[in-house]
Image: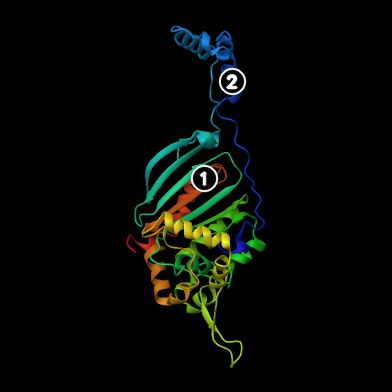
Amino acid sequence: AWRSRRFCEGSQSASRRPPMRHGLRSLAIAAGAIAGASGGLVSRPHAFSASAPAAISRRASSVHASVAISKPPLPEVVERAPATHPAFELVRVEMVDEYTIKVATYRHRQSGAEVISAQADDENKVFGIAFRTPVEDSTGVPHILEHSVLCGSAKYTSKEPFTELLKGSLQTFLNAFTYPDRTCYPVASCNTKDFYNLVNVYLDAVLSPRAKRDPTVFAQEGWHYELDAAEEPLTYKGVVFNEMKGVYSSPDQLHYRALKKALFRGHPIYAIDSGGDPRSIPTLTYDAFADFHRRYYHPSNAKIYVYGDEAELPTAERLALLESWLPEFGSSR
């Protein structure tokens, strides 16, 4: 995240540690038994003969046969078959054994949005929407847009809903991140009603932000001119502009950016600073800013992720919520 006030304010992970899935204690016992069956050969490497590896292999096989490693049964909320919805095509279903999670991938038929629904035995509920946002220059347009979409929307007209949610919701995580090639908006809560409210605010923020029709948001979050006194020269100000001035005043940050540019020399995306170079940010126009949102902030360019307990957050309800938002955007950007 770029803005320092967004770094996990008030967020404490409410998720429970997943059970140990692969019987690590049994594996340790098996490993010890195999070492003991080698007759001390490990401590005397020169005592190996041509038949020793085969003998150890046979002993190891017998130990594996006697020490059965079985998986515990899946929790009922994970065992359930993923729901279907007429507006979504079920693409595939996979198990993530390390975390005891069943993951179903859907495609919204009308908008083309990809939806990943994860069933887990966990009271924490997580939502995220990520857009592919490749950059063409170092004006910081995806970074400025990440700030700007959280400054009010069509349904939630508060000046800064993000700040209000930090103070007034039951969120366990609330943030946004700008990467060189994508921008992500994750939220989480253990309270179901609060979670649905967070999802609605974030969906309206990214799909119908006030910023795409109000240039003052761009001026506030991106850059604008300021004049402190009539006899003084004009100066540049703006939330992202000031933030990146601070970043570019750090020797460590300058070294990192120079190194990345050298490693990805000539690359059309990764050689560019998606956060914005203070020397380039003032060249960004409002029209280019609004056009970037129009091109990339569309469901067909998004991946949507919903995670939670199937009993408290049924997949059918997850899909129904998304269906209430996605159809109006059609299939083209």
Q: Residue 307: percent from the left, percent from the top?
A: 52, 46
Q: Are marks 1 and 2 in contact (CB under 8 Å)?
A: no
Direction from residue 23 to residue 271 in the image, left or right: left
The residue at the point 45 percent across, 40 percent down is 82
In depth, the one of 81 and 31 nearer the eye is 31
Is residue 100 depicted above or below 181 in this figure?
Answer: above
Amino acid found under the numbered disc labelled 1 = Pro
The residue at the point 44 percent across, 60 percent down is 325
In depth, the one of 40 and 309 nearer the eye is 40
Tell me the residue that label 2 is attached to: 26
**Distance (Cα) linking label 1 and label 2:** 35 Å
Residue 314, label in figure: 1
Secondary structure state at the residue bearing disc 1: loop
- Which numbered disc, 1 or 2, marks the residue closer to the eye? 2
For this orientation, the residue located farthest to the bottom is: 230
Which quarter of the rendering shows the N terminus? Answer: bottom right
Label 1, residues with CA under 10 Å away: few <14, some 14-19, many ≥20: some
Q: Residue 321: percent from the left, percent from the top?
A: 48, 55
Q: Residue 312: percent from the left, percent from the top?
A: 57, 45
Amino acid found under the numbered disc labelled 2 = Ser
Asked if one can make out residue 1 in the rendered structure from this viewpoint, the answer is no
Is residue 67 depicted above or below 254 in this figure?
Answer: above
Q: How many marks?
A: 2
Secondary structure state at the residue bearing disc 2: helix
Q: Residue 176: percent from the left, percent from the top?
A: 54, 59
